[in-house]
Image (cartoon, grey):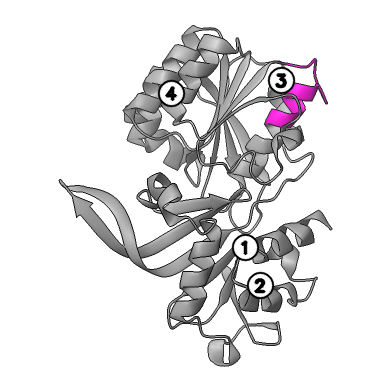
Amino acid sequence: MNEIKSFDDAASMLMPQLSTVLKSVPAAKKPFVQEIRLRLGRPLSLSCGSMTLFVTSSGEAVYSPDRAIICTKHHICETFRRLCGYSVYSRHNQIKNGFVTDNGCRVGLCGTALVKNGEISGITDITSLNIRIARSVQGAAKPVIKALIPFTGGILIAGAPCSGKTTILRDLAYSLSVGEHNPPLRVSVVDERFELSGAVGNDGLGLCDVLAGYPKSEGIIQAIRALSPQVIVCDEIGDESDCRAIAAGANAGAYLVASIHAGSYQELIQREQTERLLATNAFKWAVILSGADNPGVIREIRPLSGVSANACA
């Protein structure tokens, strides 16, 4: 039931005509939908793992695009304005990075880049919206807690896009903070893109301290400075500044839990980014997710201690 509600909540973010149609999609299909895609002049579609369905004007989800609703400029522009709360300027910092976030759902943007001094300063003429449906799945992180708690080192949650990394992080943060399977811990969540807390609200993260909208590097330092966390949770580790902040967090005695894009253990340890993260000594364990066809399912848990990306190349 919660998975159906998550779909309907995401559908409500679209302009009324499309929202009404999407809510008419058969309930049996809704739990499997991971993304709602609008492309200018193209059929309204749903991503279900490796499979794509198309939506008709009566709400049928079909395999052929022939009868599907064709997304118009009005559909896309009105949906985009709704996603921005009818204040596009207020979302400038998100838009220039290619997304906006609403109700915990990250919405990817495609259009024409505005470039200033060699850097993207914004996006105009939006032609594509990809609404990734945020879901809260109670118990999703239980295998991680059973295997790795109490902590002996930090944890990297690795998976391909749409494999459920944020779902695992969200449930892990909640469970650790309320002591669902362990003594309660002081957990700080650095939620740069409003995805971890946005879908459930701060209440859905239990007793976590939530730093929403902070860049990860600044949020981690702020947590260390003011919140004395035992655990710091953040999503999608990025650049060198994130690595430096993670090292500072580990040096302050906090355990780090973060996500990273990698479809397998081998891919993970061969990434240059992983080598930088391992150099911080903040991470000891890798949790590898199964993939987009089985979101939130853990494939394996393996140690990172002693692993070198160069040694495995």
Q: Earlier in the sequence, mark 1 or mark 3?
A: 1
Task: Verify CB contact (< 8 Å) between mark 2 and mark 4.
Answer: no
Q: Amino acid at mark 1?
A: Met
Q: Nearer the viewer, mark 3 or mark 2?
A: 2
* Marks 1/4: CA–CA distance: 30 Å
Quadrant in which the C terminus is drawn: top left
Instruction: Please indicate, yes or no, whether residue 282 appears anywhere in the rendered image.
Output: no
The residue located at (72%, 46%) in the rendering is 136
- Residue under pointer 2: 19
Q: Position of residue 273 (x, y in %)?
A: 36, 33
Quadrant in which the N terminus is drawn: bottom right
| Magenta residues (range) | 173-185
- Is residue 290 shown in magenta? no
Instruction: Rate crowding at label 2 as few (under 14), some (14 to 19) or many (20 or more) other CA atoms within 10 Å.
Output: some
- Residue under pointer 1: 13
The reply, left or right, for residue 290 in relation to residue 86 is right
Q: Amino acid at mark 2?
A: Ser
Residue placed furthest toward the bottom: 66
Q: Amino acid at mark 3?
A: Ile
Quarter-wise, where is residue 234 in the image?
top right
Task: Verify CB contact (< 8 Å) between mark 2 and mark 1.
Answer: yes
- Is residue 176 shown in magenta? yes
The reply, left or right, for residue 184 in relation to residue 216 is right
* Marks 2/1: CA–CA distance: 7 Å
- Residue under pointer 4: 218
Q: Earlier in the sequence, mark 2 or mark 4?
A: 2
* Marks 2/4: CA–CA distance: 37 Å
